[in-house]
Structures are given as structure tokens and as C-alpha cells.
Amino acid sequence: MDPVLNWDDLRIVLAIAHSQTLSAAARALGSTQPTLSRRLEAFETRVGVRLFDRRPTGLAPTSLCLALIESLNGMERAAIHVERRIAARDTGLQGSILVTSVGWFGENVLAPVLAKFCAEHPLVTVHLVNDGRQFNLSRGDADLAVRFGKFSQHDVFERKVAEVSYGVYASKTYVANFGVPNFLDGCHGHKVASLEELPGRATLGGWLASRATKAHVVLRANTIGALLAAVETGSAIAAVPRVLGDRRPDIVRLDLPGKPLVLPVKLGVHANLRSAPRIRTLIDFIAEAVAARRAELNPI
């Protein structure tokens, strides 16, 4: 007979209590809303208690559920610790690695590196998640994270693997229609596509805004790809990485006064996982492969 309580069920309860909606909890657990709904109902039936009140706005924890949350949080920390300790005692290059990165860097720089790594180490499976969210390495949300910006957790080891320089671009059509922007007068009369800023992310949008103070923002987007599309259609100017902008023949990099924007790219890993063979080998592999593209990522 199955035990009344198991960690998988309790983990679902904890995720729903934190999220208070089935859809948000499903995203956090990598599951689906119908699956979580069935699992929760089956668990409540099995233990004979109601843990959530069903409301139009979502699921509200009952008083019993609220009393259990502190203990469930402790169980989650213990489970993560056990998983991490087991992973850190790997004896060979095998197993899975979850790597997170921001969209354009993950797609254009990291993805080919990871594919080559897996080709050389066929017993290792790497899952690349390109997402603007900052995954919590201390909670075990990911094994490695490559990002622009700092890692706030004290138990995370970080290593700078690259520097990326940015430029401001316009299409040849845009320049023909509106002229070359004058950054000394704040780009008066010009149109800008800006990166939507998220907490903890490098302020690329703020950097351009401080130089185009009189320009009209026609688009705010959360990806570099969207900014490039706006530039290529001749609708606006935008700041994008030079490794992407310099490759496109129909757009031109504009001259800006002052120093160019150069942002560090950092790789983060939890301290307990740093010595696991598959993790350590991948970190060195990424660092070496990205270093080989130093001149592309940060042209002088």
C-alpha cells in the first residue's frame, strides 16, 4: 500500500500555497494545470482534509495548510540539499544539466557551445532554458545560470566568461527618411525601440534613454530580437549587441559620444555543485568556447 504522505504530493501543496493558482504552480513545477488539479484533489481525499478554499481568484490556503507551510518549506530545503549532495558526488560525465540564459545570448552564443559539449560527452544531457526570469540557484531551480548582472545568493559561485559591447543601430531606410540622429541634442525628432527593464537586469534601455532624451519611444520589448526587428523595418533606432548588429548589412551603427556600453557576462553555479565532474567540465568548456569569440563579443 502506498504511504498516505509522500514528498511529491507535499511539494505540489507547497507550490500551490506559494503561487495560489494552479497555472502558476504548474509552471513552477514543469507540469500542467489539469494534472495538478487531479493530484491535489486525490491527495485531499486520501488524507481526509481540505487544504485550499476554491475561490474565483484562485486557491486560498486553509488555516491547516498555513500551519503546515513552515514545515513544508523545511522539507523542501532538505530535499534540495539531498539532491545537491548526490549530484555533487558524481563519479563521471553523465546525467542532466539545466542551464538558463537570456534569449539572444543563449540562442546565438551558448546553444552551439552546449550542442558541441553534448556531442563530445554523449552521456550528458543539457537542457537550455532561455528566459528573462532569474532562476534561484540556491533553491535548485537550475544547475548553471549565464546572465548579465549579479548573483545575489551568498552560496553561488560566479565566474565572468565574457564581455559584450553594444551599439546603437538604424536601418539605411531610416537614415534616408529621418536623417542621422544627433545624440548631442538628445535625438530630437527621432524614434527609439527600447528594452523593457526587469529587476536585476542590466539597464540597456536606461543607457540608450540617457543619450536619446528627446526621442519618442515607439516600442518597449523584452527581447533583443524584437529590437532588431524594429530597426530592420526602418521604424526606430535601438541599442543591441554589436555581435548581432554588425552582421546585418542593411543596418548601420551610429556614432555616439562617450564610452560604449560594455556589459560582463557571468556564469553562476551553487557552491555544492561546483565540484561535480559534469558541472565543472561544462563550466570550463563554456568559458573556453566563449573566450574564443572574445573579439566578436567585444570588438575594439
Image: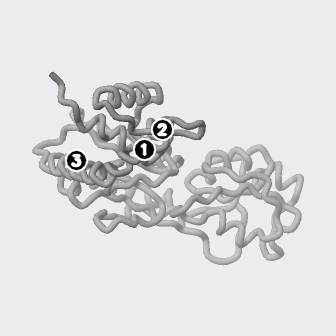
- Residue 79 disc label: 3
Work out whether residue 288 can be spotted.
no
Looking at the rendered image, the disc whose residue lies closer to the viewer, 3 or 2, is: 2
Where 33 falls versus 86 (above or below)? above
Label 1 vs 2, first from the N-terminus? 2
The residue that mark 2 highlights is 53
Residues under numbered marks 1 and 2 in contact, where contact means CB atoms less than 8 Å apart: yes
Looking at the rendered image, the disc whose residue lies closer to the viewer, 3 or 1, is: 1
Asked whether 267 or 254 is in front, the reply is 267
Query: Residue 183: x and y, percent?
Result: 78, 71
Residues under numbered marks 3 and 2 in contact, where contact means CB atoms less than 8 Å apart: no
Query: Residue 184: x and y, percent?
Result: 79, 76
Q: Residue at x 36, y 28 (%)?
A: 39
Corner quadrant of residue 156: bottom left
Query: Residue 254: x and y, percent?
Result: 72, 63
The residue that mark 1 highlights is 62
Where 287 falls versus 2 (above or below)? below
- Residue 267 disc label: none
Query: Residue 205: x and y, percent?
Result: 65, 62
Q: Residue at x 61, y 76 (%)?
A: 259
Q: Residue at x 62, y 46 (%)?
A: 225
Q: Which amino acid type is shown beneath numbered disc 3?
A: Ala
Work out whether residue 229 can be spotted.
yes
The answer for how far apart the CA atoms under marks 3 and 2 are is 27 Å
In terms of secondary structure, where does tag 3 sit?
A: helix
Q: Which amino acid type is shown beneath numbered disc 1?
A: Thr
